Image: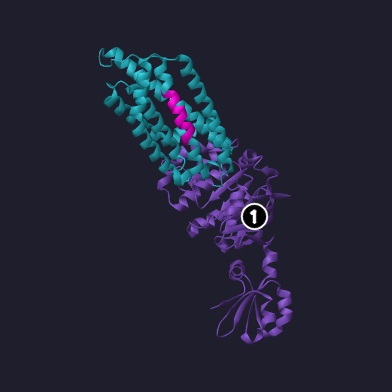
Amino acid sequence: MNAIELRNLTKIYPQFTVNNVSLDVKRGYITGLIGPNGVGKSTLIKMMLGMVRPDTGSIKILGCDMPRQEIDIKQRVGIVSDDCFYYEDVSIRDMKRIIAPFYKKWNEQKFNSYLEQFELSPKKKIGQLSKGMKIKFALAVALSHEAELLIMDEPTSGLDPVFRRELLDLLAEMMQDERNTIIFSTHITTDLDRIADYISFVNRGQLVFSEAKDEVLDRYAIVKGDRQLLDSDIRKKFTGVRETAFGFEGLVENRHEAEQLFGNYAVFEKASLEDIIYYNAKGGRAHA
Amino acid sequence: MLNLLRKDFIAAKMSLGMSILIFSIFCIFFMKKEMSMHLVGIITAFATISSLTLNDTKNHNHLFLVTLPVSRKHIVQAKYVISLLTIFVAVLASYGVHSFVKIAVPGYITVGYSMIDILVPIAIMLVLTSIYLPFFYMLSEKGAPVLNVIFFFIFLIMADPVAQTIHKASLNGINYPLVYGTLFSTLLLFIASCYVTVYLFTKKDL
């Protein structure tokens, strides 16, 4: 079953278009939404949350239609974003007083224990919190109303390495309950290397792929070799190539085919998610 | 809806203090003027409404509000309800304080107050709010402060002529059917404005 079903979503801006994106996010798993900055990840998330209305297409979250059943959806969804838009002049305690009554399943005890765990003082004003602390607060809120789906937009971008690890542990803990789902948009792919089950890659407003992480990492490969191995037909086999005076390094989408093509003349390495983003974003040839 | 109203009270704690201050200062300085009761009510109401709305745009807070389990329609309706409450409270408070001073310090306030002196500021504020809120929700973060400045200047320019007109009209005898008809029309305008704002805000990308 899918926690999120996007069908043919299109949103046209004057200088940018999210083009006909269809995406399924599987329930009970962590899906990483990856891609370079400004390719449409946040727009997709905003469309899921009803902040941006798509020009065409449909959105289903936890089996409910967005925006027709948006109140039911939002009762069951937790949101953590690197841009927290809480009221800056109020304290954490007052912010909680604003938020808690909206949720039917608000768990006060859980919230207080998260504040303690994250070392957040209820008296502190939101405006005085660092970016990392705001994300901690957003996470405490999201985890305190028993959300079944956690939508996270670049949540680790403002965090120190210690809390980033803690956050990933918390997410893993949340995933102990098989009904829970997380979609995690980021360009810091090392976080996803650790916890993601599925990867959805968005580039230039389009979905490039959405697959199990292990399958993606098995399928793609980094090929290194002498420049003499490259000709125009072979270059077409690469998602992206980086050429230097000493040789080339490129990403191929089909490792098996590349191994047959180059045999022992090239070196094959496992591609990382970062490699996949880099070569897809650069496209064609990139010169070092 | 109640949660959204409570949100406004919590988020606007500081600015509510400012409204009380504005109310007190204008009472002190305008009390002896003929149209003081109307002006104090109108200015306090508008200052409170604009600070309540600006609170929601200071840090792009609409982006936070739409993540809560409420619809955009409820967010707009709650703002109209709290504006209506603010108008009634400000005008009645002004009436209350002026009437109290009139009784407590005989001769300090020479004009007499009637029902019409409560209804007219309410009608003026209903019209202003009906114009202000659709623009506020349409313009949001970037335009709201500019909108407030424009409305502030309109106040400065229009306050005295409007006050004089009301005063002259009351001296010439009050046409009650016209007053009640106007009040009813402003209420209809207020409701229509709410529908327009819901439509504008629902269609808007945040």
Q: Residue A272 appears at what percent x and percent y?
A: 61, 69
Magenta stretch containing residue B126, yes or no?
yes
Total labels drawn: 1
Using the rendered view, name the quadrant where residue A29 is placed. bottom right
Residue A275 percent location from the top left of the image: 60, 70
- Name the main secondary structure of what is drawn in magenta: helix
Residue A25 appears in the picture as rendered: no
Residue at image mark 1: A30
Q: Is residue A171 left or right of residue B175?
A: right
Chain for numbered disc 1 = A
Kindly identify the residue that appears in the image at 63 percent across and 47 percent down. Answer: A149
Q: Secondary structure at mark 1?
A: strand
In this picture, residue B155 sits left or right of residue A51: left
Q: Residue type at mark 1: give it.
A: Ile
Q: Residue at x 56, y 53 (%)?
A: A153
Span of residues in magenta: B121-132
Foreground of the two, B42 or A272: B42
Taking the magenta stretch, the answer to whether it contains residue A223 is no
Q: Find residue B171 and report its horizontal and vertical position in percent.
A: 35, 15
Q: Which chain is rendered purple in the image?
A: A
Q: Quadrant of residue B16?
A: top left
Q: Which chain is cyan?
A: B
Q: Would you place residue A10 above or below residue B130 in this image?
A: below
Q: Residues within 10 Å of mark 1 (few under 14, many from 20)?
A: many
Q: Nearer the viewer, residue B155 or A190?
A: B155
* Residue B47 point in image, percent of width and height: 39, 33
Nearest the camera: A200 or B42? B42
Would you say B185 lies left or right of A88 here? Answer: right
